[in-house]
Amino acid sequence: MGKTALIVIDMINTYDHQDAELLMPSAESVVPVISSLLHRARQRDAPVIYVNDNFGEWRSHHGELLDKALAGPQAHLVEPLRPTDSSLFVVKARHSVFFETPLHYLLHQQGVDRLVLCGQVTEQCVLYSALDAHIRHLDVVVPRDAVAHIHADLADAALRMMERNMNARVCDSGDLWTE
């Protein structure tokens, strides 16, 4: 097995969008878990890659997205997850972290063949990203306590689909990096 990368999906967010009110309670519960995963990944020199929606801001870059989120009323959900200088950042426009992004090429260049997917939204971007990783023959791990949802029932179904249909390892974040 090659390297494992931590993929942080859509956590640089202003929460000024449809369904944000439904998402925020779940996001608040996963922020400390993702923060811990970030710390553990960095201790192991695992690549940390933020893949984030650009929210239709086609002239923006990751620094602008971060600054806007940190200046907003939900900055407390972003600050603990702030990228470091060694973090990698990919901007996406649609649900999957792979759809028309350079992520697959970047993973190949880094020697990564196993992804730990965390972030939001379980039943949308995380699910579609897990499927796209699976069809690219990448191993997928999804810590259930590190993914935020809008609808709990759909998130549970999405996690079951990832496990059953995509051979993803669905586990608790505490079970990661124990090998």
Image: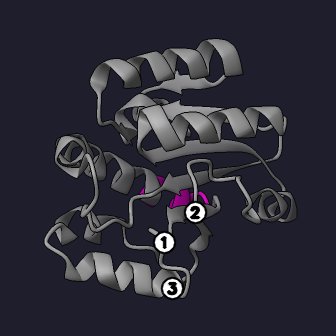
Judge from the rendering whether residue 91 lies leftward or rightward of residue 119; answer left or right.
right
Label 2: few (<14), some (14–19) or many (≥20) C-alpha neighbours in 10 Å = some
Q: Are marks 3 and 1 in contact (CB under 8 Å)?
A: no
**Which residue does the numbered mark 2 point to in the structure image?**
93
**Which quadrant of the structure image shows residue 49?**
bottom right
Where does the image place residue 142, in percent across and percent down from the top left? 53, 33
**Which residue does the numbered mark 3 point to in the structure image?**
60
Q: Secondary structure at mark 1?
A: loop
Q: Amino acid at mark 3?
A: Ser
Q: Are marks 1 and 2 in contact (CB under 8 Å)?
A: yes
Where does the image place residue 7, in percent across and percent down from the top left? 57, 53
Give, as a single range, the part of the protein colored magenta: 39-44
Label 1: few (<14), some (14–19) or many (≥20) C-alpha neighbours in 10 Å = few
**Res 178 seen here:** no
Q: Amino acid at mark 2?
A: Ala
The tag earlier along the polypeptide, 1 or 2, is: 1
